[in-house]
Image (cartoon, helix red, strand yellow):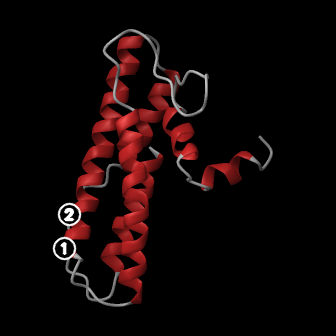
Amino acid sequence: MDAVRLMRRLLRQAAALPGAPAMRWHDRRRMAKRCASAIAYSRGKDNRRRLYRKLIAATHATRAALLRAAKRLTGLAGIAAERWRAQVDHYLPLIARVLAQSAFPTSSRPTTSAVGARTLRGPLTFRIRLQNLGFTAYRRAATRGT
């Protein structure tokens, strides 16, 4: 969900760039948010797996829209466009790593991540993985008093 939120922000910034052509893209933030909250309260492995697949599909689709926007804006000049491209170039590999880690294993063993020996299960999987990849918004939120 967090990757979808971040990519949505980048897509909105792209549309607001001076001289940017009109772009159409489907906002999947609401669907990602609903999936994440449904995962938090879901019962059963099959239902949770279906919801995770839906969340991952929304993330892939939003990433594809961001890649299309970046391709359309390659010829755009200006400081704002360069700053936007730098943000996209920074976040796209991180999001690709999160998506690669989120692939469901073929065995029944749960997925482990760079967190260490801890097993990642439940709705916070994306958030934990994004924290490990350098997304700082959650580190600040985690230190506020939780």
Q: Quadrant of residue 145?
A: top right
38 vs 48, nearest the viewer: 48
37 vs 85, nearest the viewer: 85
Q: Quadrant of residue 101?
A: top left
Contact, mark 2 vs mark 1 (Cβ under 8 Å): yes
Where is 105 relative to 6, above or below? above
Q: Position of residue 143 (x, y in %)?
A: 76, 48
Alpha-carbon neighbours of circle 2 within 10 Å: few (<14), some, or many (≥20)?
A: few
CA distance separating discs 2 and 1: 6 Å
- Residue at 29%, 53% (x, y): give it: 63
Q: Quadrant of the C terminus?
A: top right
Judged left or right of residue 140, residue 34 is left
Alpha-carbon neighbours of circle 1 within 10 Å: few (<14), some, or many (≥20)?
A: some
83 vs 116, nearest the viewer: 116
Looking at the rendered structure, the kind of residue marked 1 is Arg
Q: Position of residue 136 (x, y in %)?
A: 61, 55
Where is 44 relative to 71, above or below? above
Q: Position of residue 79 (x, y in %)?
A: 41, 88
44 vs 142, nearest the viewer: 142
Where is 19 relative to 143, above or below? below
Q: Which residue is mark 1?
A: 72
- Residue at 61%, 22% (x, y): give it: 117
Judged left or right of residue 4, residue 138 is right
Q: Position of residue 32 (x, y in %)?
A: 39, 41
Secondary structure beneath label 2:
helix
Secondary structure beneath label 1:
helix
Q: Which mark is drawn over residue 68?
A: 2
Looking at the rendered structure, the number of numbered marks drawn on it comes to: 2
Judged left or right of residue 68, residue 128 is right
Looking at the rendered structure, the kind of residue marked 2 is Arg
